[in-house]
Image (tube, rainbow, N blue to C red):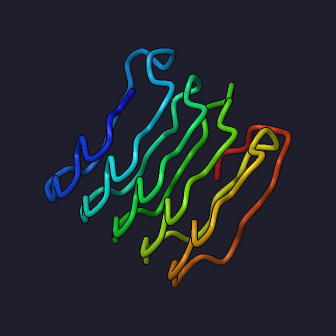
Amino acid sequence: SIEDHAFHKCVKLESVIFLNESSVMNIGNNAFSFCINLESFIIPKSAYLIGEYTFHNCKKLKSVIFSDEYSVTNIGNNAFSFCSNLESIIIPCLVELIENYSFYNCEKLKSVIFSDEYLLT
């Protein structure tokens, strides 16, 4: 797991790469919140939970990509809130729950696609 607040306020963090995509099952609450320079993130194929406020206030986050073997079932409260540059997201069909305010104040969000296929944008 990436525990709660693990990279909270790492303001210089720009990218995250998982060399072993099978190793992370849980991305905890506030794990990357206020990482204001984080631009893109690939959700590892083993992850089933994106916690509350996980990417909250990641102002430069433009791209969130679910791995081609996605398993995420839950997107927590405010998970992407205040990601003011997030323009689009493709949500896999396995997601069962998108909690309150998950995309609150995503000012540039134009496209939310629910898909049973893996698509890169």
In this rendering, the answer to whether 49 lies above or below 56 is above
Total marks placed: 0
Q: Is residue 87 left or right of 6 when viewed as pictured?
A: right
Q: Kindly identify the residue that appears in the image at 45 percent across and 23 percent down.
A: 24
Viewport quadrant of the N terminus: top left
Q: Kindly identify the residue that appears in the image at 68 percent across and 25 percent down.
A: 69
Q: Residue furthest right?
A: 116
Q: Kindly identify the residue that appears in the image at 46 percent across and 63 percent down.
A: 62
Question: Quadrant of the rendered structure where residue 70 is?
Answer: top right
Residue 22 point in image, percent of width and height: 51, 15
In this rendering, the answer to whether 59 lies above or below 5 is below
Q: Kindly identify the residue that appears in the image at 31 percent across and 51 percent down.
A: 32
Residue 61 point in image, percent of width and height: 40, 62
Residue 23 point in image, percent of width and height: 44, 16
Residue 41 point in image, percent of width and height: 43, 46
The one nearer the camera, 15 or 75, is 75
